[in-house]
Amino acid sequence: MATARGRIDKRQAILDGAFVVFARQGYAQACVQEIANEAGVAKPTVYNHLTDKATLFRHAMQAAAQSVLDQRLAALKPLTEPGPDLRTTLEEVGHRLVRLHTDDRSCALRRLLYAELTHFPDILDIAVESGPHRLSQALADRMARLILAGRLDATSPDQAAEHFLALLIGPLEARSQMGTRQIDDTDLQEIARAATHTFLQAFGAENENARRPPAR
């Protein structure tokens, strides 16, 4: 059992190290020895766990994407029981999501996906299995509960989820110049407030809608 646990931990260290190196160097410039050094293992150990560089890249991307998704799904938790102040809860969730969208791992994952997609078209599946689509599905589930509870006025929870995410990510991408410029937390909070305000104008039930404008 201890051996199996150690093997799992070592594999995770290799995947984490590989992602760091691929994010820093790009696929073509990254070498397996550098990945081994980053992971703290011998080079043959990397090949024992993952047979070649291309396989390592695919698995490292998948592991990183799953980690990013898990964090974003956890950010939705307050919407399970939002309490009496839905606006504040939506702002909190929105703020968490935009912070995660702009963290180093998320930005590196998107850069690698865009850069290597022509060489590894199959990694597009990662964007479907562990990307925005899964987040939107999970958010739609929360929106459906809010609709059933009479707290949102919408006919489609999927559409409500898509609109909320678009209101967050659209301004974020514009202000960050597609992730090339750092945005401070005050601006992230402002984006979350404005997105929530606009969302509730469109989908808020009468008792939830437009109780206060977004802060300037």
Image: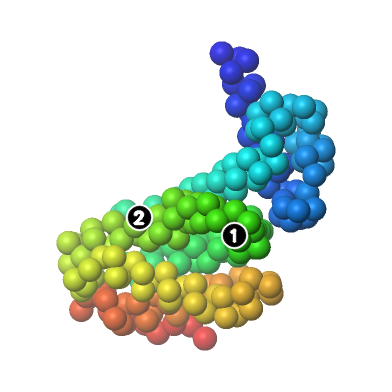
What label does residue 37 carry, if any? none
In the rendered view, how is the structure colored? rainbow
Residue named by callout 1: 117
Q: Residue at x 29, y 65 (%)?
A: 158
Secondary-structure class at tag 2: helix
Q: Residue at x 36, y 74 (%)?
A: 163
Residue 138 position by quadrant: bottom left
Residue named by callout 2: 138
Residue 108 position by quadrant: bottom right
Query: Could one spot residue 89 in this view of the protein?
Result: yes
Residue 210 x %, y % = 31, 82
Q: Nearer the viewer, residue 194 or 167?
A: 167
Query: Could one spot residue 72 in this view of the protein?
Result: no
Density class for disc 1 (Cα within 10 Å; few <14, some 14-19, many ≥20) is few
Q: Tell whether 116 sits left or right of 43.
A: left
The amino acid beneath tag 1 is Leu
Residue 33 vertical position relative to residue 75 in the rendered view, above or below: above
Cα distance in 3D space between marks 1 and 2: 26 Å
Residue 124 vertical position relative to residue 7 in the rendered view, above or below: below
The amino acid beneath tag 2 is Ala
Residue 202 vertical position relative to residue 124 in the rendered view, above or below: below
